[in-house]
Amino acid sequence: MPDTPYLVAAVAVSAAITWALRAVPFAVLAPLRSSRTIQYLSTRMPAGVMLILLAYCLRDLPLTEPRSLAPLTALAVTVGLHLWRRNALLSILGGTAAHVLLVSTVFAH
């Protein structure tokens, strides 16, 4: 079994590394908050991320099969709800509910 001073040193080093890893992001982000580039990206990135997720999720969707109507209908419900209410939570929940309902009832195998 290791000696007590060794264990104390190991715990101290682990605590220092943990504290540093948690503090460094805040120290790095402080000067970036006033950056015009970061402010621009913060307004444009959410839509960009959603478009990337949309392309990723629909990339292998076979448009010639009837089962592809479930995700496309859910997508239309999500977009419609968002344009109607401008509420991200409602849009996500509504689109998810529409997809689950369609897959489990209409397009069940």
Image: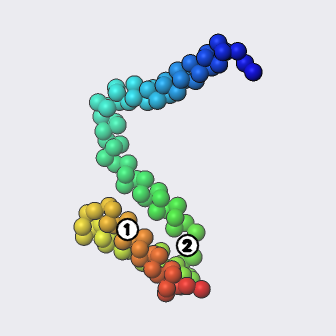
The three-letter amino acid code for the residue at tag 2 is Leu
The three-letter amino acid code for the residue at tag 1 is Leu
Q: Residue at x 53, y 23 (%)?
A: 15
Secondary structure found at label 2: loop
Q: Which mark is residue 8?
A: none
**Along the line of sight, which residue is nearer the eye, 69 or 88?**
88
* Image vertical order of residue 43 relative to residue 68, above or below: above
Picture coordinates of residue 96, whole percent (x, y): 42, 70
Residue 86 in the figure: left or right of residue 55:
left
Residue underneath mark 2: 61
* Image vertical order of residue 106 relative to residue 4, above or below: below
Q: Residue at x 64, y 12 (%)?
A: 5
Please identify the residue farthest to the left as the structure is shown.
85
**Along the line of sight, which residue is nearer the eye, 81 or 42?**
81
Residue 98 appears in view = yes
**Residue 94 sits in which quadrant?**
bottom left
Residue 71 in the figure: left or right of residue 12:
left
Residue underneath mark 1: 93
Residue 69 appears in view = no
Picture coordinates of residue 83, whole percent (x, y): 27, 68
Density class for disc 1 (Cα within 10 Å; few <14, some 14-19, many ≥20) is few
Density class for disc 2 (Cα within 10 Å; few <14, some 14-19, many ≥20) is few
